[in-house]
Image (cartoon, rainbow, N blue to C red):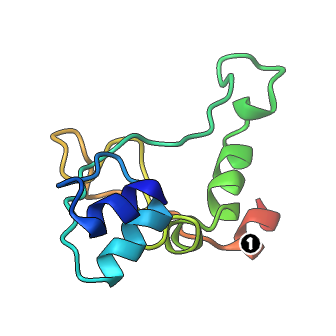
Amino acid sequence: MTQVISLKAGDINFIWDAAPAAAAQLRDAGYSLIVNVGTRQSIGGDTANPNSIWADQRIREAVEYAIDKDAICAGPGMGLYKPLYEVSLTGSSDYNTSLTPKKYDPSKAKQL
């Protein structure tokens, strides 16, 4: 809140790493945003351990289908984030455009 007030008052010239709510407020007020590709949030499990639930590919796929990434990016992410459907970031040299995204599908998750 202090950053937004200071920027609007002209006391500062930019905000580095603004919280999504602050960035969305400034965007909606007509300020320019520069959005850089950031870090990823991911769930990882011990796939090498045969006793781990993560060793079962169906479990990993079920979790992928059970998470509504679009809603998370639109809601808490205030439309500033983009969902990822693979480990590599969109635009990186190792991004695989031939993969079919596993979008939110709770019935498919339950089926798996």
Placement of 5 over or under 89, stated as above or below = below
Q: Amino acid at mark 1?
A: Pro
Q: Residue at x 43, y 64 (%)?
A: 22
Using the image as rendered, state which of residue 46 and residue 79 is in the foreground. Answer: 79
Q: Quadrant of the C terminus?
A: bottom right
Which residue is the site of mark 1?
106
Q: Local crowd at mark 1 within 10 Å, few (<14), some, or many (≥20)?
A: some
Q: Is residue 34 left or right of residue 7?
A: left
Using the image as rendered, state which of residue 3 and residue 79 is in the foreground. Answer: 3
Q: Residue at x 25, y 46 (%)?
A: 95
The picture places residue 108, in percent across and down from the top left corner, at 71, 70
The picture places residue 17, in percent across and down from the top left corner, at 35, 46
The picture places residue 92, in percent across and down from the top left corner, at 19, 43
Using the image as rendered, state which of residue 81 and residue 60 is in the foreground. Answer: 81
The picture places residue 51, in percent across and down from the top left corner, at 84, 20
Name the residue at the top extreme: 49
Q: Residue at x 17, y 55 (%)?
A: 13
Placement of 53 over or under 49, stated as above or below = below
Q: How many marks?
A: 1
Using the image as rendered, state which of residue 110 and residue 92 is in the foreground. Answer: 92
Q: Is residue 95 left or right of residue 2?
A: left
Snapshot quadrant of residue 30: bottom left
The secondary element bearing badge 1 is classed as helix
Snapshot quadrant of residue 69: bottom right
